[in-house]
Every structure is written in structure tokens, then in C-alpha cells.
């Protein structure tokens, strides 16, 4: 490790002032501490925010509101979340190990850095870690890299399972800084790499995630998360699918589908949703809708299999949720 300042402000205003002065916020630290140990990140000032009042889980007829410091395991175990928003609970249960879920915060989960091995190897070229150096993953070992939302500058997948569920449910992120508060739709919070892959979230200097809000709707109860991975536990997704359906009177009235493990950001599939809405549930509908899942995908030398696997994963999850 290297020398750095560690502070634990007693008030929200003090914490935000430290962030505005260049401090890095830390809660569970399950990502940032690893990156510091590997010298991928070297912040000079860590600001411990665990004393701030962002720990409430509130379920109302209007929706779900989750404080940024709620732990993953706490949200996954909440009885109302399990009943009303099962896609969220399941995405959390399938993420990380039990020990990490007990430590990791909801806000920190959304702020995860890429798990690309080239990003975490300081001797490799990586535009996210060192802008302008190149991307060794493009011509290297790219089996786990993205096929959607990529650019010539970065092909790393987004690591969060929870974020996929939140994008599917049209969640909103609440942010705060010394300049005030604002809200950003989760789908816009995560930035595609383009020519600036080091900018991963729509965050202004010193801003802090304070909570996440998920609107209620008839689709949230009929929802779920499927994660395909190389092993059954403590592994990142090769492909994942979050599906939420509103089916009434034998017709699909609303559909929300997002995928992970295949894109540089949590990826919504409006082309799949358009096929579903207004159709009748059944094998033909699931197959036709899933056939659009990989629209626009671009494979690298080692991950073309993800395109077919993506279609199959979406079809399987549509069938599972649609025929409950």
C-alpha cells in the first residue's frame, strides 16, 4: 500500500465538502480497496461515509426507495422487496459471495469498476485506467468481453448484476454534492465508453450517490433474474437477463428486458420489448422476441458464442417469467 489520508466526517455536509476537495468516498470498500492494493487506483484521501443517514429501505404504493449505504444482503433479504421486486432480490443473491454481500453497499455496487483483467493489470494497455494507452483486450484474451456498446477504445463488460435489474425497472439514482441535488435515470447514469472510457458514470466532481428509487408497477411482481456463468457461485456473468412482464387478460401489457455480461453498460432491449407488448404469451412470442436480443452485436475473436447464448438466455428467462 501507499500513504493516504483517511477521514470519517461526522456530518453529511462535512463529507460532501471532503468529496468536493478531491476525497474519494468509501463505504464497504469491496472494490476500491482491491484496486488500491493492486495500485490500479491511488486516491490520496479516502472519505468514510458509513456514518451518513442513507440506510433506509422504504416500500410504498409509489415504489421502492433504497439508501445508498444499505448492504446488498440486507436489501436481498427484505420481505417486501422479495415479494414485490423479486428481480432485484435475485440479482443481489447471485452477485458476489455471502461475505462480500454483507459488506458491499448498494451505492458502491453501482460504482464498481470493470473486472477486465487488462484493466486490473497495470502493465497492460487500458484506456479506462490510463486514457490514450490503448486496449489490449481487443486483440487479446477477450472471451469475457462485451459484444454490445463497445468502441475501439474499450470492450470491457459492466460487472454489476443489480444494475441490470435496475435498468430494466426504470430506476432513478439520487445524487448530492455541495452544489445541491439531482436525479439521473439509471439507464443514463452508466456511460458507454465511446472515446472516453475512463468516464464510467454521469457523476460531477464531489457528487455522492444517496439513494436509488424504483417506481412501482404491475410488472414488478412478475419479474426475475437469470445469470449464466462458468461456475455456480462467486463468478461474474457471461450473460444475464432481467425480465419483468405485465400480463393481463392473456395479453402482455408491458415488458421490460435488460441484459448483463454482454455489454459495456447494463443493456436495455427495447427491440425485444416491442415484440412482446400486445402479443399473447407463448413459445412463439418468446422465440420471436428473443431473436432480437443481439441486434447490433459485434463479436471479437473469442466471444462470438455470446451472441447465440444471449438469445437463448433471454428466451429462457422470458419463458420462465411469462409462464409463472
Image (spheres, grey):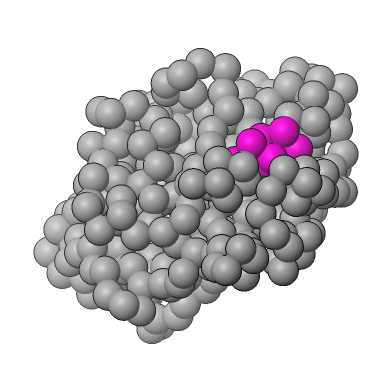
Q: Residue at x 23, y 63 (%)?
A: 57
Q: Quadrant of the N terminus?
A: top left
Q: Residue at x 45, y 72 (%)?
A: 217
Where residue 284 sits in the image (x, y, percent)?
A: 78, 46
**Left or right: where does residue 245 sit relative to residue 123?**
left
Q: Is residue 136 visible?
A: no
Where residue 78 sits in the image (x, y, percent)?
A: 22, 51
Q: Hey, which quadrant is residue 15 in on the image?
A: bottom left
**Left or right: where does residue 318 sit relative to residue 13?**
right
Q: Residue at x 72, y 43 (%)?
A: 283
Asked whether residue 301 is drawn in magenta, I would say no
Where residue 88 sits in the image (x, y, percent)?
A: 41, 51
Q: Is residue 58 visible?
A: yes
Q: Which residues are magenta?
A: 310-317
- Our reading of the magenta stretch's main secondary structure is helix
Q: Is residue 242 above or below residue 118?
A: below
Amino acid at each position: 500500500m501507499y500513504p493516504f489520508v483517511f477521514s470519517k466526517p461526522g456530518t453529511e455536509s462535512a463529507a460532501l465538502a471532503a468529496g468536493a476537495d478531491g476525497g474519494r468516498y468509501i463505504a464497504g470498500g469491496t472494490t476500491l480497496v482491491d484496486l488500491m492494493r493492486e495500485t490500479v487506483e491511488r486516491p490520496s484521501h479516502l472519505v468514510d461515509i458509513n456514518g451518513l443517514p442513507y440506510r433506509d429501505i422504504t416500500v410504498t404504493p409509489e415504489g421502492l426507495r433504497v439508501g445508498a449505504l444499505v448492504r446488498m444482503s440486507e436489501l436481498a433479504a427484505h420481505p417486501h422487496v422479495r415479494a414485490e421486486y423479486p428481480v432485484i432480490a435475485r440479482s443481489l443473491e447471485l452477485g458476489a459471495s455471502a461475505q462480500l454481500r454483507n459488506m458491499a453497499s448498494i451505492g458502491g455496487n453501482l460504482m464498481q469498476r470493470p473486472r477486465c483483467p487488462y484493466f486490473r493489470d497495470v502493465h497492460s494497455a487500458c484506456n479506462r485506467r490510463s486514457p490514450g494507452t490503448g486496449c489490449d483486450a481487443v486483440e487479446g484474451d477477450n472471451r469475457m468481453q462485451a459484444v454490445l456498446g463497445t468502441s475501439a477504445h474499450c470492450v470491457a463488460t459492466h460487472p454489476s448484476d443489480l444494475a441490470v435489474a435496475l435498468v430494466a425497472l426504470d430506476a432513478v439514482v439520487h445524487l448530492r454534492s455541495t452544489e445541491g441535488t439531482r436525479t439521473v435515470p439509471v439507464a443514463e447514469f452508466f456511460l458507454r465508453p465511446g472515446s472516453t472510457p475512463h468516464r464510467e458514470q454521469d457523476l460531477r466532481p464531489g457528487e455522492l450517490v444517496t439513494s436509488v428509487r424504483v417506481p412501482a408497477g404491475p410488472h414488478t411482481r412478475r419479474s426475475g433474474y437469470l445469470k449464466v456463468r462458468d461456475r455456480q457461485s462467486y463468478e461474474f456473468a457471461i450473460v444475464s437477463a432481467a425480465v419483468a412482464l405485465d400480463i393481463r387478460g392473456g395479453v402482455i401489457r408491458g415488458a421490460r428486458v435488460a441484459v448483463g455480461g454482454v455489454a459495456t453498460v447494463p443493456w436495455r432491449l427495447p427491440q425485444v420489448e416491442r415484440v412482446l407488448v400486445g402479443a399473447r404469451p407463448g413459445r412463439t412470442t418468446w422465440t420471436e422476441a428473443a431473436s432480437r436480443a443481439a441486434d447490433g452485436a459485434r463479436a471479437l475473436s473469442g466471444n462470438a458464442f455470446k451472441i447465440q447464448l444471449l438469445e437463448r438466455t433471454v428466451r429462457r428467462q422470458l419463458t420462465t417469467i411469462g409462464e409463472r
